[in-house]
Amino acid sequence: MILLTGFEPFGGANFNPSWAAAQAAATALTDAGQPATAVVLPVEFGAAADALRHELAAGKYGLVLAVGQAGGRTGLSLERVAINVDDARIPDNAGNSPVDQPVVPGGPAAYFSTLPVKACLRALGRAGIPAEVSQSAGTYVCNHVFYALMHAVAAEPGVRAGFIHVPHAPEQAADAGRPSMEVAVMARGLEIIARTSLSTVTDIKLGAGATH
């Protein structure tokens, strides 16, 4: 089974493309014979991780793709590393603003994604979908969920998991001229990431680093 998670709207918005894309990708994967479930998470420190852990305990998932919105990015961002810190620039949807707090007290400083991010990057490029390997998922609720996910599956050999950021949808970016991507393209990208992750045993070597 495949689990995809997205987030509810936050920061005063009324739409979050991560949830729409996760739903569409889960439907497409299931229709193609690869059963998938989509779950929406609250944009709240603590509550989001609790909801994720509840869903992980309820099903036997071999692949987990957590998805969040990162306005300003130009393509899908395959996040490489989750760090054990919450440091909110804006309050979450419950008004919480943790600063310099661990996601998991006593947990490792960081976890790497177990998705084959380079193979996924190549597959997305071949499909004409803009994408990058990102070296930081931030310190807001997206990173909080990413770290909580990797901590939860660390003791589950064989479970692959990671985090993908998506850009704004066109309706969110039209007035400000920000980069955007159609939700259908995001969903197609998530499908490709899921299929590549299921079919790739060892990731490929492909330059996709950053100078800063």
Image (tube, rainbow, N blue to C red):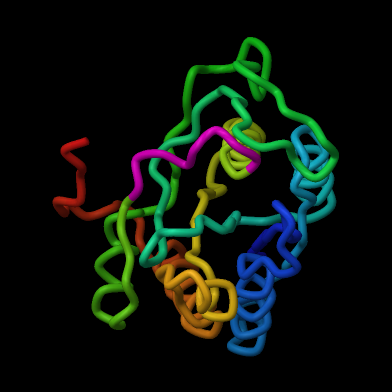
Q: Quadrant of the C terminus?
A: top left
Q: For residue 146, which quarter of the picture?
A: top right
Q: Which residues are magenta?
A: 134-141
All told, the count of numbered labels is 0
Is 137 one of the magenta-colored residues? yes
Q: Pick whichever, 85 or 50, lies toward us.
A: 85
Q: Residue furthest top?
A: 106
- In the rendering, at what x and y percent does residue 154 appear? 57, 32
- Give the side of residue 8 with respect to residue 162, left or right: right
- Give the side of residue 179 with respect to residue 36, left or right: left
Q: What residue do we see at 70% from left, 57% from top?
A: 7
Q: Main secondary structure of the magenta part?
A: loop
Q: For residue 105, which quarter of the picture?
A: top right
Q: Pick whichever, 66 or 94, lies toward us.
A: 94
Q: Pick whichever, 164 or 54, lies toward us.
A: 164
- In the rendering, at what x and y percent does residue 1 appear? 67, 65
Q: What residue do we see at 50% from left, 28% from top?
A: 83
- In the rendering, at what x and y percent does residue 60 appear? 73, 55
- In the rendering, at what x and y percent does residue 40 appear? 77, 60
Q: For residue 66, which quarter of the picture?
A: bottom right
Residue 95 is at least partly visible in this image: yes
